[in-house]
Image (cartoon, grey):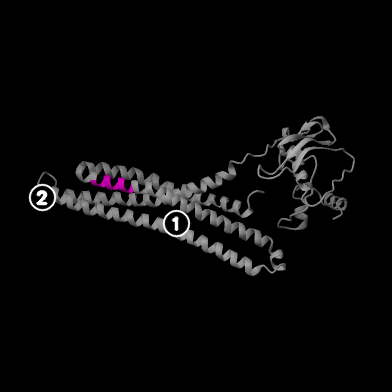
Amino acid sequence: EQRPTGTLVARLHGVETIREFVSGAAVTLVLDLPFLLIFLAVMFAYSWQLSLIAIGLLACIAAMSALMVPVFREKLNRQFMLGARNQAFLTEYVAGMATVKSLQMEPHVEQKYGDYLAQYLAAGFGTKQIGNTYNVVANGIEQVMTLAILIVGALLVMQNDGFTVGMLVAFQMFAGRMSQPMLRLVGLWQEFQQANIAVKRLGDILDIPQEPHALVPSREGGGKGRIELIDVAFRYSEHHPWLYRNLNLRFKPGHLTVLMGPSGCGKSTLAKLLVGFYQPQEGHIEMDGRDIRHLAANELRQTFGVVPQETILFSGTLYDNLVMAHPHASFDDVIQACKAAEI
């Protein structure tokens, strides 16, 4: 609940970036790298002097890549954050379109989204400029390598020291063959940075501790469902005030317990504490004498249900929504449940 839905969706879209890198760019690297080493070995067999020129220019490209990594990564991060903000903005306002129309907020929303979109496009243009500059410089270095090999090779031929014109032509051909994998590796470097950003953003979601889940849910002792809060204290974060302090409460099975209070006093939060959505900072909650933190999520939530204030209907028919938690329920069971809930 601390992150907008659109931000989570934008992070999950990073899976496609990772998939494209692994299935496409990584395969290119596996194929190009061995040939790059083979071409270098053949070039050294022809002339170690000219080979050092090629290696030196490769080192220049590697140094340029290392220098541009922080700048390119910062641009990618900003582009991703602005894209996630746009996604969150659209998701929230489309979901609340009735409120937007009822309050006549369309001009304000349109202007705000236009500003967000302009910032995102500007960030994308800046990222593209960095990538294009890198490609242009890398191609320029490749042309310098070709020219340097021709000049130095011509000098070696004129020295009449065993290096012939035919060897120079062959060396130049191998150097050209080597430059193609090298330039592909330049493009691969950019894709790697994008995949790296996607992995980190996706890792923010995957690293969240998962709720415990029991393969065979069971309740020990066959309790009746007595719920007891013992010295419970809770707040949403260290920057928020305490919502509860030393809260002691008991829900007896078979009894009606009514909690009343003004809006924002924590009634809905209490329900989320009972089903394990939140954990108290102090104290504990027991069900039939067992701390609910020692129960798996499905063991806890199969015992009792909570009806939130804002019920969300998923796509499909009303019947599909009613049987979503119990897909094997019969039609008579659904009718009986609807009558009990006064639907």
Disc 2 residue type (three-letter): Met
Residue 163 appears in the rendering: yes
- Residue 267, given in percent of the width and then of the height, sits at 79, 47
Q: Provide the residue span drawn in magenta.
A: 53-61
Label 2 or label 1, whichever comes before in sequence order: 1
Residue drawn at (50%, 62%) of the image: 121
In the rendering, at what x and y percent does residue 272 appear? 75, 44
Nearer the observer: mark 2 or 1; the answer is 1
Instruction: Assign the magenta stretch its main secondary structure.
Output: helix
Q: Three-letter amino acid code at disc 1?
A: Thr
Q: CA distance from mark 2 to mark 1?
A: 47 Å
Could you say whether the residue bearing mark 1 is in a helix, strand or loop? helix
Q: Is 57 included in the stretch rendered in magenta?
A: yes
Quick check: 294 left or right of 120? right
Left of 333 or right of it: where is 95?
left
Q: Is residue 299 above or below residue 19?
A: above
Q: Residue at x 35, y 49 (%)?
A: 64
Outermost residue on the right side: it is 255
- Residue bearing mark 1: 127
